[in-house]
Image (cartoon, helix red, strand yellow):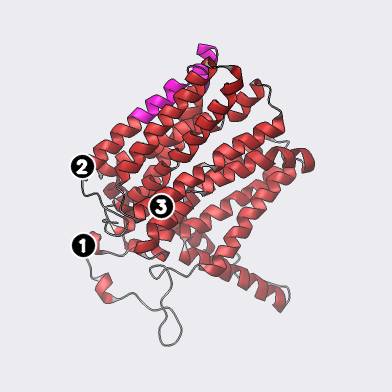
Amino acid sequence: METLSSAGHAVRAAEHEPGSGRSARGGDSGGRHDAGHDRGSVQRLDRAAPGLSVGFRLPGGRLGAGCYGARPGLLLASRVLEGVGFWVVCVASPALIRRLVPPRRLAPIVGLWGCFFPVAAAISQLTGGFLVDTIGWRAWWLGAAALAVAVGVAMAAVIPPDASTAPRRGNDGGPRAASSSVAATSTTDTLPPAARSVGVRAKATLSTGPLWAAALVMGCYTAQWNGVILFLPTIYAEAGIAAGAAGALSAGAAACNALGNLSAGQALGRGVKPVTLWTIGFVTMAVCAVIAVGIAPLIAEEWRFGLRYGAVIGFSAVGGLIPSTAISQQMALAPAPDTVSTSLGLGQQFNALGQFAGPVAVAFLVQNAGGWHATWWVTVSFAVVGLLASWWLGFAHRTGPTLSSGRG
């Protein structure tokens, strides 16, 4: 697998350091067997997907913060740790999918992967408030962390090892040196993924202009979606809608985004051009935003809510065409097979920037304009920038690379 920078390697190095407690001293043989089995599971996940190994272990740091939530510094630090783990999983998972899935099925599976965020957002909005009120935020906190660790353990059992990271065995069962043909290779472009340094791969990624355009498309989409969907509970509360109903309505709007992701995967698999999907997505998001916050307040009250909610559903569902298409293009535009993860990492940086910039811009406009009526300017502005980036990318790559034929 195309490894995620040095994160996975650093963890593996730490686990192999002398004195790191790899062998159980004292205790019975059953305890040593269990410890060895646990280490074996961790090592299998490290070999199969180093990035995921790190990503699913980091949220476990939330356990301490959940138990000592009265300490704000520890709580904030654990949230940062969780964010790093989330970022690592978001980058490593598509690259792992690319390694495991046949090319002809890759686009639909990437579309399915793109559903994780809207589905998770919908579940959180629908159940989060109820669970916090029922079992308390600490139990909710610990449960989410335990679930992340459990998923990591399950993945260790089902993901096959990557040939580039799995240790080679000689006839005697011991480690064997790498092939001399690989050792003698001097051209970095022909080296296997593990042989090229992070700096070389990062330089190759950052010097690929189309990747920046695809990342910008992702950031513009995320800024719009988060700027609208995350504020829906507040908008509904101000409209006098009960908290439970507001949560259900917000969850429905978020979940509809999964339909767009699935549709994008199917469309790409049938040969629809990425720029076509991006254009449909951005134009629809812009129009629906104008209807929801610019036009709906001007019509009769009995029609207002239906028009506004319908526009929000269209905004989220059709907008879902954008992220899966962007992820697919980031994978296809990678300059070399071992730069897929770094290419996805560039897109994830813009994704995170959009998650921050969108809600901040909306909140700023609400505060200074005295209401939600002018916030459509934010979404339309991001849509225009996203359209320009996608059109430039479509023009620069008229025969644009696909997941099965791209350089990555």
Quadrant for residue 381, please give it: top left
Quadrant for residue 129, please give it: top right
Using the image as rendered, state which of residue 21 and residue 68 is in the foreground: 68
Q: Is residue 216 left or right of residue 261?
A: left
Give how far apart the Cα atoms at labels 1 and 2 are: 28 Å
Residue 20 vertical position relative to residue 331 in the rendered view, above or below: below
Q: Amino acid at mark 3?
A: Gly
- Between discs 3 and 1, the one toward the N terminus: 1
Give the magenta range: 363-384
Q: Are marks 3 and 1 in contact (CB under 8 Å)?
A: no
Q: Is residue 209 left or right of residue 348?
A: left
Magenta highlight on residue 260 = no
Mark in front: 1 vs 2: 2
- Can you give x and y, in whole percent of width and height, for residue 198 in the image? 35, 53
Return the residue found at the far bottom: 171
Q: Residues within 10 Å of mark 3 (few under 14, many from 20)?
A: many
- Between discs 3 and 2, the one toward the N terminus: 3
Which secondary structure, mark 2? helix
Q: Which residue is mark 1?
A: 187
